[in-house]
Amino acid sequence: MTRGMRPEQVWGLGLSGEAAAAISAALGSGYGLRNWPAGQHPGERDLGRGAPLVIFVVKEAWDALSGPARKRLEEWEVPQRVLVLSQDQSVSDFDEVLENGFLSAVSEPLTDKKIRDVIFRAKEVKSLYDDIFRMTREIMLERELLARKTDLVLFLNRFLTRATESLDPTVILDKAREDLHLLLPLRGLSCILWRPGESGEYEAELFLEPDMGHAAELHWTGELLRQGARLAGQGMHSYRATFLDGANGKSAMDIPQTAEDLIALPLRAGGVTFGVLALYRAKGRPLGKDQVQTLYASVNHLALALKNAALFSQVKIRADHDGLTRIHNRRAFDERLVEELRRHQRYGQPMSLLMLDIDHFKNINDRYGHLMGDQVLRELGHLLSETLRSTDFTARYGGEEFVVLLPQTTEEQSRILAERLRRIIAEAQFEHDGKTFGITASIGVATLLPGALIKRKELLDKADKALYQAKRLGRNQVCTSLGPVSRLGEAPLDEANAG
């Protein structure tokens, strides 16, 4: 035996001195024998110190064991038990050898050959048990790994399904925040998406956690813009912020204390980077390799969903906006008018409609050409967008005719606004071949009083008749559907001519 190695343990139960001496002599110095005399047996403490290779059990000592002591030895599956019989007992007479879990039985006298044969068989069985135990552990480990991979696949399937359920980036990011919280301890999520504008400079949209303090909002806005500029290769020319929905029981997001708290992941689709997802990670255990891989796969799915949402938004903008003036088109106006009428009837608030027409627009096309006419229409669309409130809805109704919806606006307020628009349009100057010229517009105003029930066509007819009155009176006028002409210095119409 090599120095420092512990000898292999062998136990005896009820062995005589002669039998114990024969076993010790046959095994040599590499083994140590511990024997319990008849009437004694190993206790719980002995069983907990380590298992021997073999326990030689004399038949009479086995029969004398109490029920609990025998049960403990029977249930102890690590060591092999060998039944020792007297000379007058035959092995074939004892069916209990296998029934009671003995490896084998040997009869006295115990010779070297019998003892070594028992040790050899015990080692073979132990080696077999070790192999089975090792394979069992490997199988259990494989099952655990398979279960983890299955859970991650199910997570990815859930993540992908929920990410593609909507084309609203706010909804997509809200769901992503809920799902990613199952993968890692997450305190908050924010995002920046950018796209090139008409001038080639980047316009960005920021998505921030709600209910942040002013300092935290400034920090995350700056952080997102910095990350975006780093990946886009240039700063953002302009941006607007959108706040995500709040989560139940979730505290407002604060400022990260260390750089390790922030995970910034680029959003790419088709080889083009168009955004950054910023994850504010709470303290916890580091992510495992499979979790990191799942996180990257999730972000790839999220990037595709957000890219599809951005493309849908662009398509919707094209569908809802006039290609020349870049304001809403007639289809979008018709939809919005129905919504505003429902809101007017539900909440009993006033609502007004402006109908605007460029005076003698045909003459502009005939004199300066259609390209100049298009330029005039574009500039008028720009003037309307710049002058009106964000709550107002402007659309090109057709040709040189425009409409403006004014929610919660009385007749007097709409008349003042229309007059202001008329003056701004009249003051605009256009240049063609080194010469300048101006335009004028006629505007008709129709107003719904609180609680008034009216159909869409009736409101349009009222505004159209008011516009016709402005044209009939010499153009460059503002007329209301209730009768008076609101251009300064003009007398009011009589009721018969109001329309």
Image: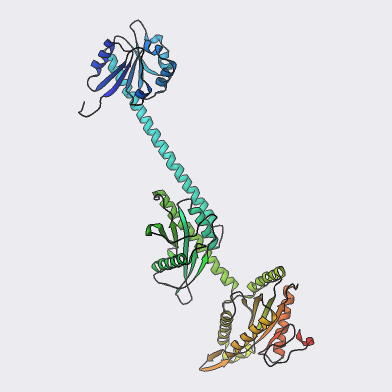
Query: Residue 62: in sight, yes or no?
Result: yes
Quadrant (top left/top right/bottom left/bottom right) for the C terminus: bottom right
Q: 335 or 239, which is in the foreground?
A: 239
Q: Is residue 16 above or below residue 44?
A: above
The furthest residue to the left:
3
| Residue occupying the point 70% across, 81% down | 411
Q: Is residue 249 left or right of residue 263?
A: right
Q: Is residue 258 above or below residue 421?
A: above
The furthest residue to the right:
496
| Residue occupying the point 71% across, 88% down | 485
Q: Is residue 433 left or right of residue 282?
A: right
Residue 69 in the image: state x and y as whole percent.
41, 18
Q: Is residue 140 above or below residue 233?
A: above
Residue 387 in the image: state x and y as whole percent.
58, 81
Q: 309 or 323, which is in the foreground?
A: 309
Residue 442 in the image: state x and y as whole percent.
66, 87
Q: Is residue 162 above or below residue 67?
A: below
Quadrant (top left/top right/bottom left/bottom right) for the N terminus: top left
